[in-house]
Amino acid sequence: MKKLLFVYGLLVVTFLAYIWYFVLRDEAPTGWNESAAGLTGEISEKYVMVTFQSSLDYWRTSMKGFEDAAQQLNVSVEFQGATQYDPNEEITVLEKVIARKPAGIAVTAINPEALNPTIDKAVAAGIPIVLFDSGAPKSKAYAFLGTDNYDAGAQAAREMARRLGGRGKVAVVTQPNQLNHQERTRGFEETLQKDYPGMSIAEVADGKGDILVSSQATNRILEAHPDVQGFFATQANGGVGIAEALETLGLAGRKVVIGFDTDKGTLDLVKSGVIDATLAQGTWNMGYWSLLSLFHLHHGIVAAGGGEGSHPIPPYMDTGITIVTRDNVDDYYAK
């Protein structure tokens, strides 16, 4: 009889454990609107990514990261952007997005100052904003997610010096009004000055983020400084423009070219040897972690600068950089 009661008791305990684990536990609130399935939102929550030069292939990987995070969180996303390299157009786009009061906005700033009043307006209205790829450090945006651009420039300088044996004149084609390009250029210049006294920079030119303008800038540089042995482009179109100019002049493969980013045009030129190396950014990470940051801010799980009962959102996340050469270029084509 005792043995039978013991068996009955064991069955009751097992049944109660089953009810708690598979029924009651899922319904128990955690304080984060999180079930056993994970942290999720509502499909009515709309998060927006705002870019400039919106047709650039460069943004696609960031958008994919944004979308992947949205799918995991069960929220909606949208992409808006200025069609041109124009601060006023991006401000107009951002103003329109703010007027619709989304759950959060990820912005890449075309200019480190121009968007500040509009960004601050969104924050004052209670709309979380994070910056990715290109920042606006004096704005009230909650965080910046992107490349350590100074370090990226330094890595480009070391790669250039390695290929030129630490000697020779080089030139830079950049976008001097954009903060991330300023930092890349500064990292490149200061690393050469500090570590490679046998090298010098003949000229820093504005390629305006355009292939044709960058090609024309390369021609002017070579006319003025025919002894330039290498070029560093701080942006994808700049590298392609340099390559096109060198091919036209019959100098492809005779000048070292360090590009930036992993659009197909750049990767093809690395594969053919016209561009010697390019720097790959963690663009998927930018999009993915931007949305996660916005989601956590919107739901009050984290807060800017901390606060009672909250955890501070990291103000900066380095999304990484990798040097791409002929040896590993195939790994960077879109699958």
Image (cartoon, rainbow, N blue to C red):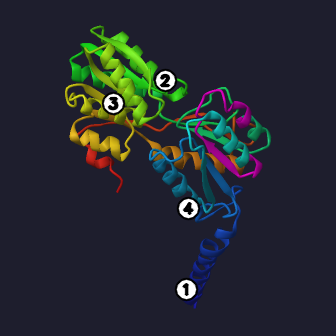
Using a 10 Å C-alpha cutoff, classify the residue at mark 4 as few (fewer than 14 neighbours), some (14 to 19) or many (20 or more).
Answer: some
Residue 155 appearing in the image: no
Q: Which residue sits furthest right?
A: 125
Give yes or no for contact between labels 3 and 2 (Cβ–Cβ under 8 Å).
no
| CA distance separating discs 4 and 1 | 46 Å
Q: Tell me which label, 1 or 2, sits earlier in the chain.
A: 1
- Which residue is the site of mark 4? 71
Using a 10 Å C-alpha cutoff, classify the residue at mark 1 as few (fewer than 14 neighbours), some (14 to 19) or many (20 or more).
Answer: few
Q: Looking at the rendering, in which quadrant would you find the C terminus?
A: bottom left
Give yes or no for contact between labels 4 and 3 (Cβ–Cβ under 8 Å).
no
- Which residue is the site of mark 2? 183
Q: Position of residue 268 (x, y in %)?
A: 28, 44
* Mark 4 or mark 1, whichever is nearer to me: 4
* Mark 4 or mark 3, whichever is nearer to me: 3
Q: Is residue 33 above or below residue 114?
A: below
Identify the residue at image location x=40%, y=29%: 214
Tag of residue 242: 3
Tag of residue 7: 1
| CA distance separating discs 2 and 4 | 34 Å
Query: Regarding mark 2 in the picture, which secondary structure is present there?
Result: helix
Decide which of 271, 11 is in the foreground and name it: 271
Image-quadrant location for residue 243:
top left
Tag of residue 308: none
The boundaries of the magenta stretch are 98-119
Left or right, 15 with reference to 246 = right
Left or right, 199 with reference to 211 = left
Q: Looking at the rendering, in which quadrant would you find the N terminus?
A: bottom right
At label 3, the amino acid type is Ile
| CA distance separating discs 1 and 2 | 72 Å
